Amino acid sequence: MAAPLTKKKNPAPCPFQESMDLLSGKWTMSVINALMGGVLRFGELERAVPGINTRMLARTVKELEERKIISRKPYPTVPPTVEYSLTEKGLALKPVMQALQAWAISNYHKAQAAQG
């Protein structure tokens, strides 16, 4: 009889899985894509990502900031002004984003053609 499969208590970190965990959030790629165009204030970023609400955007930018994908630059103004931009680590995702966009466009048109 085979030994039962058990999960390792502390598996070695896998860079691929870590990356997929980071990028798999519903809004993560949309926020990164919006910031590929340059620096955006919070309200501009919210308008650049259709369908996202304020709470989800705040959560997403916080996570991306913690993971050093984006940087947050607050200004001492009333009302508060905050600008977001991609870090060097975030900008390194540009070829990945371009490849995903090309794949999405190609497959979208194929799916549209198949539907008639």
Image (cartoon, rainbow, N blue to C red):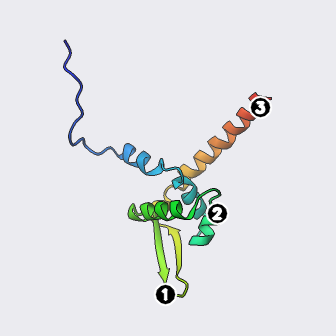
Which amino acid does the dot numbered 3 rest on? Ala
Q: Nearer the viewer, residue 91 or 9?
A: 9
Farthest bottom residue in view: 77
Q: CA distance from mark 2 to mark 3?
A: 29 Å
- Which residue is label 3 attached to? 113
Badge 2: residue crowd in 10 Å (few <14, some 14–19, many ≥20): some
Is 109 placed left or right of 96 in the picture?
right
Is 46 placed left or right of 4 in the picture?
right
Vertically, is 1 above or below 14? above
Figure quadrant of residue 30: bottom right
Is 37 placed left or right of 28 in the picture?
right
Q: Residue at x 52, y 69 (%)?
A: 85
Which amino acid does the dot numbered 1 rest on? Pro
Which x, y percent locates residue 47? Answer: 65, 65
Name the secondary structure under disc 2: helix
Which amino acid does the dot numbered 2 rest on? Ala
Q: Residue at x 65, y 57 (%)?
A: 50
The answer to whether any part of residue 52 appears in the image is yes
Kindly identify which numbered label has been placed on residue 48.
Answer: 2
Q: Quadrant of the C terminus?
A: top right
Vertically, is 111 above or below 64? above
Q: Residue at x 63, y 56 (%)?
A: 51
Q: Earlier in the sequence, mark 2 or mark 3?
A: 2
Which x, y percent locates residue 46? Answer: 60, 65
Q: Earlier in the sequence, mark 1 or mark 2?
A: 2
Vertically, is 28 above or below 65? above
Farthest top residue in view: 1
Nearer the camera: disc 2 or disc 3: 2
The answer to whether any part of residue 39 appears in the image is no
Kindly identify which numbered label has been placed on residue 76.
Answer: 1
